[in-house]
Every structure is written in structure tokens, then in C-alpha cells.
Image: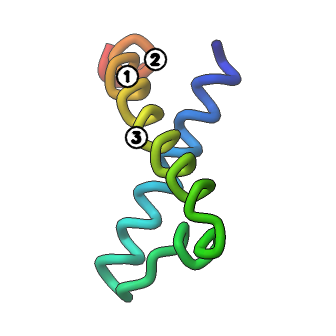
Amino acid sequence: MKNLHMVAILLVLVGALNWGLVGLFNLNLVTTLLGTMPGAETVVYTLIGLSAVYVGIGHKKDCKICS
């Protein structure tokens, strides 16, 4: 479970970084890197969304500050 948690956290951070870049510079990093592969882009966005749900549901159990 630790590996799944680490991957989920990494994907959530990538998603947050991407939204920050979109907000500040109108630069979508995922599209920039995978623009020629729309199927891969969809998979990345889906994995980021699922990771956010996973982290949100398991956050209180995993977080030493919140528990």
C-alpha cells in the first residue's frame, strides 16, 4: 500500500503543479509533453483524478497531523 500511496501523492502533486502553471503562465504541462498523444493525455488526467480521490479518502488515516 505504501507504493500505491506514494504514486498517488506524486500524481496529485503533478496535477497541482500543472494547474499552477496553467493559472500563472497559461501553460498546460501535460498537453505540452503529450500533445501528440491525446489518448495518453486522457489516461494521465484520469490517473491524476483517481489519485486525488484516493488521497482524499485515505488522507486522515495516513496523515500524522490530521489523525
Where does residue 25 sit, x and y in percent of width and height?
A: 38, 88
| Residue 1 position within the rendered picture, expressed as x and y whole percent measured from the top left | 64, 12
**Horizontally, is 47 left or right of 3 in the view?**
left
**Residue at left 55%, top 50%?**
44
Instruction: Tally the marks.
Output: 3
Q: What element carries label 2?
A: helix
- The label shown at residue 49 is 3
Query: Between 28 and 65, which is closer to the camera in this rendering?
Result: 28
Mark 1–mark 2 contact, CB under 8 Å? yes
Q: In this view, does 24 lie to the left or right of 44?
A: left
Q: In this view, does 46 lie above or below 58?
A: below
Structural distance between the alpha carbons of marks 2 and 3: 19 Å
Q: Mark 1 points at which residue?
A: 59
Residue 39 - label: none
- Of mark 1 and mark 3, the one earlier in the sequence is 3
The answer to which of marks 2 and 3 sits earlier in the sequence is 3
Q: Residue at x 29, y 77 (%)?
A: 23
Mark 3 neighbour class, 10 Å CA radius: few under 14, some 14 to 19, many 20 or more: some
The secondary element bearing badge 3 is classed as: helix
Callout 1: SS: helix
Going by the numbered disc 3, the residue's amino acid type is: Gly
Distance of mark 1 from mark 3, alpha carbons? 15 Å
Where residue 57 appears, as percent x and y from the top left, is 33, 19
Q: Which colour scheme is used?
A: rainbow
Q: Against 67, is 49 above or below? A: below
Task: Indicate the amino acid at tag 2.
Answer: Asp
Q: Looking at numbered disc 1 in the image, what kind of residue is underneath it?
A: His
Residue 6, placed above or below residue 25:
above
The C terminus lies in quadrant: top left
| Quadrant of the rendered image containing residue 65 | top left
Which residue position holds label 2? 62
Which one is in front in this view, the residue at disc 2 or the one at disc 3? 3
